[in-house]
Image (spheres, rainbow, N blue to C red):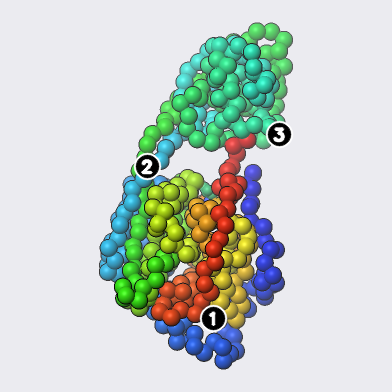
């Protein structure tokens, strides 16, 4: 039940994407207009060593790097040490988040009911062992439960209209000791309550067929059930952002601007995340190396974020904790997430509102100069550019779409990585950043942008 937020077809420049990868990789006939740029672009392009990117992906993607685990911590150390080896003072920014361990067992037995029940659990349900009478509670909406006393009972609720989390809270507020939510369509129900809450009571899920049979049974007579959720745990965990800063070369000629080049170093469970997002992490490292000693008048921050996969937690923490004065200085966020899969489509830049901004303009200009085709842009969230975009900062996600079939699977491994794709994105982004950050830059000026607010850009799966 993924909800793709990406809507292609917004940008006029998208017509170019019809030419596909081949056109994108072909070098254009030289134009006089490009001449002054050639030297600047080549300065960056010549320094990019795609083997560095590839080898660092290989190193990082040996194991999954789930936020809060030792493997993520190891990745953080590696990233910090790599930045340091390039001459940066790398800073590690710690933050905490609510971690969840799913239950080891969930069971439901109903007195006198002979049909087999296979309850599944909801992410963020609390543990508990409760016995009580089953009470039919409709959709579990506040209006339905007003004046209903569910004290000590197990509420049987149908999926629909409001979120699973709200249903559990409404039933708990009416006194329920436990909650069963059944599906309103065929298939298993694997939902989430959306976040931890100490007002929750244990909750399990049933299929539509199971739920309807149970509702029919409980309607005809009072029925006792016992519901058990064991081993579910909610605990504070720690994750980290790694930040390396390149200050302007000459203080006297410096601008007050900051460019953020970022990626996320964590992965989902079971996925080594070679493309998602060791690729972006290794590219962030390589661009930091390439740009280290190049004269610039604009500050560049290279950041790898933690806990992106758990809800953009690291990047949100970073943006939320910047002093306003610092936030005002950030003119661009280049977000590199999934930038090297052999099996994905062409490069696209996703902005939270589908509109062009300084980042897309700089990268369209650089891709046009390098490849003769401007990289198209479209609307899309789902990654660390979202908190930047929502803070009013020009931000874009660099990604190949359609994405590869290995996305979020154990098959997201180094053998699926294309050096050509890595090289192409590193060149486009590296030259775009340099175009803006070098002395006497020629790139477009940042425009004042309106603050966007669209929570839908945080991808929420199975909450309702
Ligand atoms: N790299 C993906 C984002 C992505 C995938 C964007 C495919 C566009 C197409 C990212 O790491 C991710 O998986 N994000 C989560 C959302 C996040 C808020 C938990 C997602 O899309 O499920
Ligand atoms: Zn990702």
Indicate which disc residue 185 carries.
3
Q: Tell me which residue sits at (62%, 69%) in the image.
A: 376
In the image, residue 110 lies at what x, y percent? 60, 15
Q: In this view, does 429 lie above or below 455?
A: below
- Please provide percent x and percent y for residue 104: 45, 30
- For the residue pair 448 and 249, the one nearer the viewer reads as 448
Q: Is mark 1 on a helix, strand or loop?
A: helix
Dot 2 corresponds to which residue? 96
Residue nearest the observer in this picture, 333 or 419: 333
Marks 2 and 3, how far apart in space? 37 Å
Crowd band around label 2 with a 10 angstrom C-alpha radius: few (<14), some (14–19), many (20+)? some
Give the crowd class for mark 1: few <14, some 14-19, many >=20 residues within 10 Å.
Answer: many
Q: Residues within 10 Å of mark 3 (few under 14, many from 20)?
A: few
Q: Is residue 417 visible?
A: yes
Image side of residue 379 versus residue 319, left or right: right
Q: Answer left or right for 325 relative to 189.
A: left
Q: In this view, does 347 lie above or below 198?
A: below
The residue most toward the bottom is 32
Whichever of callouts 1 and 2 sits on the residue coming sooner in the sequence is: 2
**Contact check, label 1 and label 2, Cβ < 8 Å:** no
> Residue 183 versus residue 195: which sits nearer the camera?
195
Quarter assignment of residue 173: top right
Quadrant of the snapshot with the C terminus:
top right
| Residue ID at (56%, 77%) | 365
Can residue 278 be seen by looking at this rendering? no
């Amino acid at each position: 039940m993924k909800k793709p937020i990406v809507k292609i077809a917004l940008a006029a420049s998208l017509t170019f994407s019809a030419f596909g990868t081949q056109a994108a990789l072909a070098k254009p006939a030289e134009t006089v207009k490009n001449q002054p740029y050639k030297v600047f672009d080549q300065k960056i392009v010549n320094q990019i060593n795609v083997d560095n990117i590839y080898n660092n992906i290989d190193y990082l993607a040996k194991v999954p790097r789930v936020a809060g685990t030792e493997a993520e911590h190891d990745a953080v150390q590696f990233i910090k040490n790599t930045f340091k080896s390039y001459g940066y003072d790398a800073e590690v920014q710690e933050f905490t988040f609510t971690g969840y361990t799913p239950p080891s067992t969930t069971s439901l037995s109903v007195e006198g009911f002979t049909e087999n029940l296979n309850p599944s659990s909801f992410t963020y349900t609390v543990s508990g062992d409760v016995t009580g009478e089953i009470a039919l509670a409709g959709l579990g909406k506040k209006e339905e439960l007003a004046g209903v006393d569910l004290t000590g009972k197990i509420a049987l609720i149908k999926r629909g209209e409001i979120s699973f989390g709200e249903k559990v809270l409404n039933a708990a507020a009416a006194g329920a000791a436990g909650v069963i939510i059944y599906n309103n369509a065929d298939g298993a129900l694997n939902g989430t309550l959306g976040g931890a809450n100490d007002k929750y009571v244990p909750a399990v899920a049933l299929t539509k067929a199971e739920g309807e049979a149970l509702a029919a049974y409980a309607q005809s007579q009072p029925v006792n059930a016992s519901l058990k959720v064991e081993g579910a745990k909610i605990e504070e965990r720690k994750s980290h952002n790694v930040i390396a800063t390149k200050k302007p070369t000459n203080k006297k000629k410096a601008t007050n601007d900051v460019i953020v080049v970022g990626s996320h170093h964590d992965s989902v469970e079971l996925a080594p995340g070679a493309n998602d997002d060791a690729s972006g992490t290794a590219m962030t490292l390589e661009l930091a190396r390439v740009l280290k000693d190049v004269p610039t008048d604009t500050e560049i921050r290279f950041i790898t974020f933690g806990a992106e996969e758990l809800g953009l937690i690291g990047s949100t923490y970073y943006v939320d904790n910047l002093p306003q004065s610092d936030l005002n200085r950030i003119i661009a966020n280049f977000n590199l997430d999934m930038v090297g899969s052999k099996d994905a489509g062409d490069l696209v830049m996703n902005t939270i509102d589908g509109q062009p901004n300084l980042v897309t303009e700089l990268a369209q200009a650089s891709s046009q100069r390098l490849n003769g085709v401007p990289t198209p842009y479209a609307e899309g969230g789902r990654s660390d550019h979202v908190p930047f975009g929502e803070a009013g900062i020009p931000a874009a996600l660099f990604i190949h779409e359609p994405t590869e079939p290995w996305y979020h699977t154990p098959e997201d491994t180094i053998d699926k990585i294309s050096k050509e794709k890595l090289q192409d994105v590193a060149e486009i982004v590296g030259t775009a950043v340099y175009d803006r950050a070098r002395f006497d830059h020629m790139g477009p000026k940042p425009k004042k942008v309106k603050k966007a607010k669209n929570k839908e850009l945080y991808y929420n799966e199975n909450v309702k």
